[in-house]
Image (cartoon, rainbow, N blue to C red):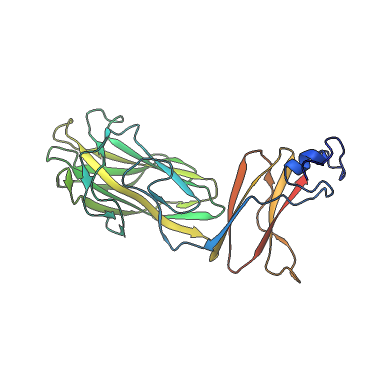
Amino acid sequence: SISTADSTSDADGDGVSDHDEALAHTDPNDPLSYLAIRKFTASAKPPPGLLIGWDTTTGSGGDYSMPGIAGELLMDQAYALDATAGSTDGTFGSAISGTAVGAPAYAVRTATPGSTDTLGIQIQNTSGLDVQLDTLHFDYTPFFSAGPQDITLIYADGDLGVTTGALVHAVSGIPATGKNSNYNDFDWSLTNLTDFVLAPGETAIFKLIASNAGNPSSSGGFDNVALSGDLIGGEYLASLAWRGQIGKKYQIMVTTNLVSGSWQPATPHTDGTPAETSITISNDEAAFYRLDVAPY
C-alpha cells in the first residue's frame, strides 16, 4: 500500500523508490510491472457516419462527435455567430438527420475578404485508429439577394498529404432563402483528395469561403456543418487511459485467451508523461488487455 511503501528502498532496482511506484500504481517488486489502467471502455465500432458536427456551438467537441474525434469551427475569419438566423430543415446537408432546428447561424459577408468571409472546420483524430474522411455536409443561404452567392471549399492546413490551399469544391449562384428558412443543402465528397485518411494524432483544417455579393455588407449564413467518415479497424473498440511517469515507456498488450493464449503488442511503445494518456484500439473479436511499463 502507499502508506507502508518505503520512500527510499527500491526493491526491483529500477531506479524508482517503492513509495513512488506505489503512488504511480506500479508493482515495487517488479521492474517490468503493469500499470493500473484507470479507465477502460469497450464497445462495438460505430457505423460509418457522423464524425463531428456543429449546429449550435463552435466548440472543440462539436454538438455531436464520435468517440476519438475532436474538432472546432473556426470563427476568427467569419463575421458573427448570428442568433437571429438558422436553418429549419433539421439535417446536416441533405444526408444526416437530427440537428437542432433554427438559430444560430454562422454568418459571413464579403466586406473584409479574409476576415469576415470564411468559416474554418478543424478535425483531429484523437483515437488510436486511422480515420477516413468521406464527406463535408453543410447548409448555406444568402440571407438576402445581395448576400454572398458563391462558396469555395479549400484544404487550408494540417497533416493530410494535400497541398495547402488546394481547391476541393466550388459552387456559384446559390439562391437566397431567408435568414430563418430551409437553407440550401450541400454534401461534398472529400474522397477526391490525394489523401483523405487521418492517422492517429493528425489534424486537418478546411475553409468555406463566401464570395460574389451584390452588397459587401449583406450576409449569408452557414448552419448544420458536419464531417462524416469511418474509423478504419476491427469491429470492436477498446479505450484505455492511464497516468504515466517520465522515464518510463508503456505498451498495451492483447490476448484472446487468458489460459492458453500469448500476449501480443497491440500498440507501439508510448513515452511516459504525468498527464493522462488515452488510446483507442480495435479488434475483430473479444479480447483481454494489459498495460506494460518498463524503464528506458
Q: Residue 263's image quarter?
A: bottom right
Residue at image coords 59%, 51%? 279
**Residue 59 seen in the figure:** yes
Q: Is residue 160 left or right of residue 253?
A: left
Nearer to me, 1 or 178? 1
Q: Pick the quarter of the image with the C terminus.
A: top right
| Residue 45 higher or lower than 210, as above or below | below
- Farthest bottom residue in view: 260
Nearer to me, 123 or 150? 123
Residue 99 appears at what percent x and percent y? Answer: 30, 53
**Residue 123 seen in the figure:** no
| Residue 88 higher or lower than 149, as above or below | below
Residue 212 appears at what percent x and percent y? Answer: 19, 37
Q: Is residue 40 left or right of residue 179?
A: right
Q: Residue 108's image quarter?
A: top left
- Farthest left residue in view: 145
Q: Is residue 39 left or right of residue 101?
A: right
Residue at image coords 29%, 39%? 209
Residue at image coords 61%, 43%? 276
